[in-house]
Structures are given as C-alpha cells and as structure tokens.
Amino acid sequence: MAEIKALIFDLDGVIVDTAEYHYAAWKRLADQLGITFTKADNELLKGVSRVKSFDILLGLGPVEMSEGEKEPYRDQKNKWFVEYISKMTPADILPGVVDFIAREKENNRKIVLGSASKNAASVLKNVELIDAFDAIVDGTHVSAAKPDPEVFLKGAEAVQVAPKNCLVFEDAAAGVEAAINGDMYCVGIGAPEVLGKAHWVVPGIGYIKMEEFKRKIESL
Ligand code: B16
Ligand code: MG
C-alpha cells in the first residue's frame, strides 16, 4: 500500500456530532412550515449541503415553494444552528479524536478538514481544535457536493500530498464514495451496512490504530 502522508477528516459525525444541532434547527423550521420531520428523516441530511437539505425537507411535506422563496428559510435555519453551535466546547469533541490527531501529528502526517459545512471553521474554533489543522476545506471552498471528490482533492492539494497518499475519515455514504472517487483510502465511521464501500469501518476515531489499518489494507 502507498504511504499515508495526510489524514482528511469529515467534521459532522467524525470530529463532533453537530447532527443533533442540525436536527434541532431543521425541526424548528419544519414545525413552523407544518412539515412532519423526524430523527429518521434527519439521517437523509447527513453530509448533504444546506441547499439540498432544505429541498429534501420540503419533499417530506405539502409545502410548495419557488427557488426564490427558499433562501430566507435556509438563512433562518442557519441562524438557529449558529446559535446552538456557539455553546459548543471542547467537551463536544467525540471520544479519541484529540489523542489520535496529536499522535498522528507526531508521526508527521498532515491533518486536514474536508467538510460540506459552511460553519466548519466556527465549530472548530468553538471546540478549540482549529490550530490542530494544517488545512481546512469546507462548504465555503467547494462547488460540487460529495460524492464528488472536490472537497478532498482540494484538501490534499492544500498540503501538497498526492491523493493516493491520503486517508479520509467519513461517516456518510456519499463521503465514502467521494474519497473512493478521489482515489484515496477511506475509513468509515459508523455502521458497515451503510459505509460498506470504505476500506475499513469502525464505530469511532478512538478505535483506530494505524498499524491495524495497514494490516487491513494489505489483507484486501
Ligand atoms: P451547513 P459534514 C455536513 O457536515 C452535515 O453533515 C450536513 O448535515 C449539513 O447539512 C452540511 O454539513 C452543511 O452544513 O449548513 O453548516 O453549511 O458531515 O460534511 O462535516
Ligand atoms: Mg459527516
């Protein structure tokens, strides 16, 4: 296998669990619009852009809206989301993440963020992890959504590492596909039934040992 020189992390579901804040904000909007929106529905929005998320939400109910009418609603959702994430602290970082990143920095691997969120930098600042990253590529830098590999390819380019030397950590099926489409290695964080295309699937970053990952790849 090629040497791993850069680690590219998705944000929501990998470093922090902002999905619950996205859910609370979308739910507030759905209630206002008279659309039934459940936690199960929220799964459809993971890793998906804000614009696409609102279209999915509208698809769940009887509300018709022209393109021009949508923006104020998306803005309102984002205002609520920003309010929720402003209360995040380092205690919101998922188990094992801080130690894993510190260890891999010592191993001279570049640490990169590859997220669909336009709020990624704010979240990383609030949980005091922003300085750990050598490069941040988020929803403000890309035009094509996952499973397009743009976000990860830009991340690799930012730290001048070839895609084949990158390992992506992703919790969404579209994100795993994006990594594979970008010719990168990928560890899925979550359920093997959903993330089956990844080279290895674990329940959380805390479970990863790079030696084990290498053995896994070599056995494929
Ligand atoms: P925003 P990720 C994604 O983050 C979330 O999983 C997804 O639910 C959200 O709609 C998207 O970011 C956009 O977020 O509204 O903050 O721009 O998993 O790619 O880190
Ligand atoms: Mg995610």
Image: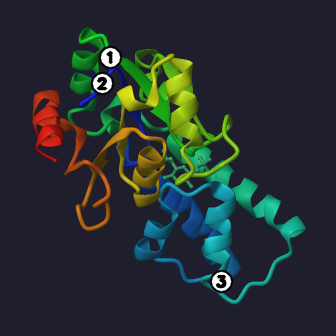
- On whether ligand 2 comes within 8 Å of the CB at mark 2, the answer is no
Query: In this view, which residue lies farthest toward the right?
Result: 68
Q: Earlier in the sequence, mark 1 or mark 3?
A: 3
- Give 23 or 173, whichever is nearer the viewer: 173
User: Which numbered mark, 3 or 2, is in the foreground of this view?
Assistant: 2
Decide if residue 137 is in sight here: no
Three-letter residue code for mark 1: Arg
| Element marked by disc 1 | loop
Residue visible at 10% across and 36% down in the picture: 215
Q: Earlier in the sequence, mark 2 or mark 1?
A: 2
Q: Are marks 2 and 1 in contact (CB under 8 Å)?
A: yes
The residue labelled by disc 3 is 34
Q: Are marks 3 and 2 in contact (CB under 8 Å)?
A: no
The residue labelled by disc 1 is 109
Mark 2 is surrounded, within 10 Å at the Cα level, by few (under 14), some (14 to 19) or many (20 or more) other residues, namely some
Q: Where is residue 160? Give x, y as percent.
A: 51, 16
Up/down of 131 relative to 194, above or below: above
Residue visible at 48% across and 42% down in the picture: 182
Three-letter residue code for mark 2: Ile
Query: In this view, which residue lies farthest toward the bottom?
Result: 62
Residue visible at 55% across and 83% down in the picture: 36
Mark 3 is surrounded, within 10 Å at the Cα level, by few (under 14), some (14 to 19) or many (20 or more) other residues, namely few
Q: Where is residue 75? Give x, y as percent.
A: 74, 54
- Give 177 or 16, whichever is nearer the viewer: 177
The residue labelled by disc 2 is 4
Name the quadrant of the N terminus. top left
Up/down of 173 relative to 156, above or below: below
Q: CA distance from mark 2 to mark 1?
A: 7 Å
